[in-house]
Amino acid sequence: MKGTCKPVWALALIVCVATFFAPGGVAAQSEVVKIGYNAPLSGPAAAWGLPGLEGVGIWLEEVNGAGGIKAGDKTYQVEIVKFDNEGDAGKALLGARKLILEDKVVAMLMLGGAESAVVQPFVTKEKIITFVLIASDIAKDRPYLMDVTDNFPVYHLLHTEYIGEAYPKAKKAAILSQDGEIGVAAIAWSEAGFDAAGIEVVYSKPFGMDTTDFAPIVTAALATKPDILSMGASYPEFQALILEQAYTQGWKGIITSACWDFKAITAKVPVEWMQGAVSGFPDFDDPKLSKTQNEFYAKWQAKYPDHGFSEIVWEYMGGLEVWKFGVEKAASIESEKVFEALKASESVPHAFGPGVWWGKEVFGVDNLLVPNWPITEIRSGKPAIVAQKSLADWLAKPGNKDILFKCLAKWKLK
Amino acid sequence: MEFIGQTILNGLMTSSFYALIAVGLSLVVGVMHIVNFAHGEFYMVGAYTVWVLYAKMHWPFFLAVAMAIVIVGLLGLVSERLVFRQAKGNILSGFIMSVGLVFILQVAVVKIWGLGKMKPVPAAYPQVLDLGGISTSWQRFIVVPATILLLVALWNFLERFKVGRGLRAAAMEPEAAALQGVSVKKSAALAMLLGSAMAGAAGALMAPIMSVHPYMGHSVVWTAFVVVIVGGAGNIRGTIWASLFFGFLTTIITTLLDSTIASLVTVLVMLILLAIRPQGMTGYAED
């Protein structure tokens, strides 16, 4: 037996060595670069994390299918490492430590909000670039935190400006937003927008995150007789319950929100009742968007025919797209170099057009990528682009900056 | 006036929900002397049953609700036989067992249906009910007559049937009831069956109104315990009065201030009432 084993082992060794050094073998194959996906995949915030995996999955298929991402003379296959932080800041930190220290991710995709305050000291120490969806998380002491897709809550200024122009008879607004970092930021920026548009905010009390019955809260808000009901930023599950209450308590008017889970909402209220609701996120089959977005939508719809489209589907993927742009510019996957390459770019591609860096005058650092932002209205059960608005133009209007800073100070955000 | 009317309507609906969930718990605590924290999970299973049968399999809504009542009632019966009977009236053992049951039921639901987004249950009766300036949805309003119907049925059972009277006796004076030939084991099983079925009914009726997820029982069970403690464990009438009191208190404070403050005040009021009347607002049973 010993005599027969030796040649087999020798042959196996030769095969292994040959494979290793052969052209097209292991040494010549693409390396793998890992990106962390540290987001709520369950719990009340899941609608702000889970759909993102759909877009990210399509992006991975396309990029890896085309050979991977090029960084100088190297090519990398991209791998996403998921971590469900359940929207809990403590779990998000646990996730960040696991993803960075164990999985060795070079960048991280996150929702943001309360999570950022807990996670960022560690991420900053590790110098890992983090793409969040909450612009108000950007801060001077969080240099590697960027928002390159969603302009929340900044775009509330533009939604409200549009409402002021399109519905001049609407004079009173009630903001029904959840408590906490995200909700309060939405209230502050919405208040500034309404104020600048000449609309009085008659209700803006944030509701507790432990609220299960929205009937009393909606009753209190509707008692102020608002023409406009702003959802500020409330978990999509909350939005559906709030709007159901507004509908059943007989209210009619203009609805606005940072975003929708339209399928969840229209399971509770008639589609016609939502007609004209204002937001800033079109479905990507909107003919006013580029061919690339329309093609992405077609792929997504073919893959998830029963799912409702929300901005979350593309936003985390949008972070990957910007990261890829930075990697190619930097010719490196190293987090710091990618960050520097991105910041050195005067214009960075965004789903809604070329974006420029902004934020220093409010957040202390220009880490928000701002394109011209679309305004949508619900038309025949779907969001349709009805206008495009510019943050620069809004800020340039006399008195607007003062109003913004006053509202941010009121809500202790500046 | 509209504001006051709407608040009264909201309070009535909240009270109905509290009564539905708390009366079942009151029976269980009163008869079995077990602090059953899994009552919230029975409520959650009721909601999931409606989600599966009505929202996913498109059964008629009330048939799904009836099935939820049966399924959760049987689940309670099995829990009594396999888990709580082993506690033999030991409150601490029963409490720990019920916490174990909480985790088992939550994990089971997560394993079967996953976590992810909350489960959407469309309203079966989304039409608006206009009551002269104040309004709500029929879906929300049916909780009120459904609660009255279930409570009247329970009341009749406890008053008119021998086995029901035995159950009340077991809650009021367990030793005297045993001396009169009331089977403690059978009373405990019956209390668990009825109590769990009520939790299942609450979950089933509330599924289209609230968010359905594996942890939805957590906040509900705390409220139910506050109501039971104040109303008197095993005291159905006291529990109904306490449900009305806390239903309106929570609604008014949430409307005027905030839901977090409402929770805080609810517990504070419970502590004050307990300090004044340790046996509960109207109650007997638990000294």
Image (cartoon, rainbow, N blue to C red):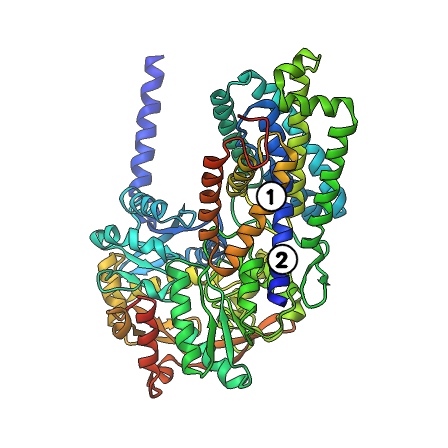
Q: Residue at x 65, y 57 (%)?
A: B9
- Neighbor class of circle 1 (other Cα within 10 Å; few <14, some 14-19, many 20+) is many
For this rendering, which residue is in front, A305 or A386?
Answer: A386
Q: Which image quarter is the N terminus of chain A in? A: top left
Are the residues under marks 1 and 2 on the same chain? Answer: yes
Residue B197 in the image, given as x and y percentages of width and height: 67, 34
Query: Number of labelled discs?
Result: 2
Picture layout, residue A385 above or below residue B248: below
Give the quarter of the figure containing the C terminus of chain A. Answer: bottom left
Q: Secondary structure at mark 2?
A: helix
Residue on which disc 2 sits: B8
**Does the image show residue B45?**
no
Tell me which amino acid carries mark 1: Ser
Corner quadrant of residue B68:
top right
Quickly name the residue at label 1. Answer: B243
Residue lying farthest to the right in this orientation: B160
The relative height of residue A222 versus residue A7 in the rendered view (above or below) is: below
Subunit bearing disc 1: B
Q: Nearer the viewer, residue A315 or B200?
A: B200
Indicate the chain on which mark 2 is placed: B
Are the residues at dot 1 and dot 2 in contact (C-beta closer than 8 Å)? Answer: no
